[in-house]
Amino acid sequence: QLQAYGGGLVQAGGSLRLACAASGRTFSSYPMAWFRQAPGKEREFVAAVSRSGDYTYHAQSVKGRFTISRDNAKNSVCLQMNSLTPEDTAVYYCAASSLALRIQYNTASGYYDYWGQGTLVTVSS
């Protein structure tokens, strides 16, 4: 089970740090990712991290502003979000995959089979 938290209301230009804690299963051997879904839009890929944490991949829309990281000792993954804009407003979901993904290519949500409940990020202008 995955539990995402850390969302909230922030002004444009501000920062938030999302975290996702895993329980009931060790996800250290699973690639993990963050997705987001804005109102009226499809869920989209944000960032992914390899099982070891050595490799990360970020969507072009967040590259240079967001950073994904993981701590396998704590069975958790984080998303540091800086320079937020109103376009970043969405429900953010953490996910894990039991597949041996190539994280920079396998970005579709269908590759991920474990999902958290989502945490809402609202960026005001």
Image (cartoon, rainbow, N blue to C red):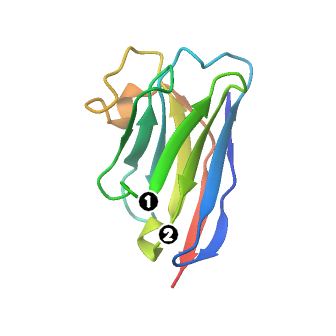
Q: Is residue 118 left or right of residue 45?
A: right
Q: Earlier in the sequence, mark 2 or mark 1?
A: 1
The image quarter in which residue 40 lies: bottom left
94 over 17 or under it: above or below = above
Considering depth in this image, is 68 or 86 the residue closer to the camera?
68
Under mark 1, the amino acid is Arg
Under mark 2, the amino acid is Leu
Q: Is residue 107 left or right of residue 26?
A: left
Q: Residue at x 37, y 30 (%)?
A: 110
* Residue ID for mark 1: 65
2 over 91 or under it: above or below = above
Closer to the eye: label 2 or 1: 1
Crowd rating for badge 2 (residues with CA inside 10 Å; few <14, some 14–19, many 20+)? many
Tag 1's secondary structure?
Answer: loop
Q: Residue at x 63, y 43 (%)?
A: 117
Are the residues at dot 2 and dot 1 in contact (C-beta closer than 8 Å)?
yes
Crowd rating for badge 1 (residues with CA inside 10 Å; few <14, some 14–19, many 20+)? some
Mark identifier at residue 31: none
Tag 2's secondary structure?
Answer: loop
Residue 76: image x %, image y %?
Answer: 66, 32
Report how far apart the C-alphas of labels 2 and 1 lie in the structure.
Answer: 8 Å
Residue 13: image x %, image y %?
Answer: 52, 76
* Residue ID for mark 2: 84
86 over 59 or under it: above or below = below
